[in-house]
Image: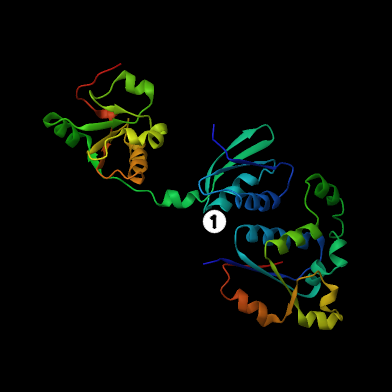
Amino acid sequence: MTRKTAIIAANGGLFDAYKVFNIATAAAATDHAVQIFFTFEGLNLIHKQGNQQLKMPAGKEHFAEGFAKANVPSIPELIEMAQDLGVKFIGCQMTMDVMGLEKEHFVDGIEVGGAVTFLDFAQDADVTLTF
Amino acid sequence: MIHTDYVLDAKGLACPMPIVKTRKAMKDLQTGEVLEVQATDKGSTADLQAWAKSSGHLYLGTDAEGETLRHYLKKDGLSEVEETIEIPEISLSSFQELLKESSLTILDVREEQEFRDAHIPGALHIPLGDVETRAQELPKNETIYLICHSGRRSAIAGNILAKAGYENLYNIVPGMRDYNGKTTSL
């Protein structure tokens, strides 16, 4: 029986992106079925332009050097890797409506769904996380 | 020194890349082959152990060499371990009683020097590390009594021989450590 990891991404900063995509790729690499539900600011993480210029939290900009030194992959790279590993991205329909965003504004391959779409996957997930 | 079939260079990569690369590399290996993952990410030791465990592979260990960690993983090895066949045990005292009455086929699996120093007269000798490759030297239709120093190595040898199709095996517990019968040396 495949194990399942369900993640809610509700914040839109660079640190949030790393938390979400590192856990997601690690879980997928361990053969978990992974779904991420992007809602509110979380949608930033998969926005075509937005995900290329995510911001560090105010006052933490000096960590940029550490990221480079540790040879951490970029967010677009992690997104591609996650999708290659079969991680499923779901954009929150309601938030998209509120923000006037369409599916085309996001990286290819996402699905758009409501809360129930995600809950259906999450109800028997082995790991459930919120970032 | 662990024999490796494939080397993955994940040096300089940060989490979760070593795991992602390992997963990809492991796909190209055959069951039983060993992957060596070279990494500098200090978290990779714990990560690879956990990854191996949940992916059905056997984590064999890690060698550190300067900054570089060499992790060894055996593909699908976990199921092998789970399928361990435990052979029946015989107490050393019962074995010594039997030995007084009849001649028995005994396999001593200790190392060369231990065997040279003192062993039961007539005992066959194959060090544990060679049991898998030299199993065919043993008679298949006889009961074989396995012995080592304590009973631990002989249990592993028993598992190997049972998998190779040997049926009448007994592990002597404890082993030569407490044996007080006749011995001979080389």
The image quadrant of residue A27 is bottom right
Of residues A13 and B20, the one nearer the viewer is B20
Does residue B122 appear left or right of residue A104 in this picture?
Answer: left
Does residue A72 appear left or right of residue B19 in this picture?
Answer: right
Q: Which residue is mark 1?
A: B54
Does residue A38 appear left or right of residue A53 in this picture?
Answer: left
Residue B135 in percent (x, y) is at 35, 36
Quarter of the rendering occupied by the N terminus of chain B: top right
The image quadrant of residue B174 is top left
Does any portion of residue A54 appear in the rendered image? no
Q: How many marks?
A: 1
Q: Badge 1: how crowded within 10 Å, few (<14), some, or many (20+)?
A: some
Depicted B13 relative to depicted A16: above or below? above
Residue at the image position 55 percent from the left and 51 percent from the top: B52
Does residue B115 appear left or right of residue B59 in this picture?
Answer: left
Residue at the image position 83 percent from the left and 83 percent from the top: A98
Q: Chain of mark 1?
A: B
Residue ranking furthest to the left: B101
Residue A121 in percent (x, y) is at 62, 75
Secondary element at tag 1? helix
The image quadrant of residue A6 is bottom right
Of residues A52 and B109, the one nearer the viewer is B109
Quarter of the rendering occupied by the C terminus of chain B: top left
Residue B143 in percent (x, y) is at 22, 39
Residue B31 in percent (x, y) is at 52, 49
Residue at the image position 30 percent from the left and 43 percent from the top: B166
Check disc 1 and give the amino acid type.
Ser
Does any portion of residue B86 appear in the rendered image? yes
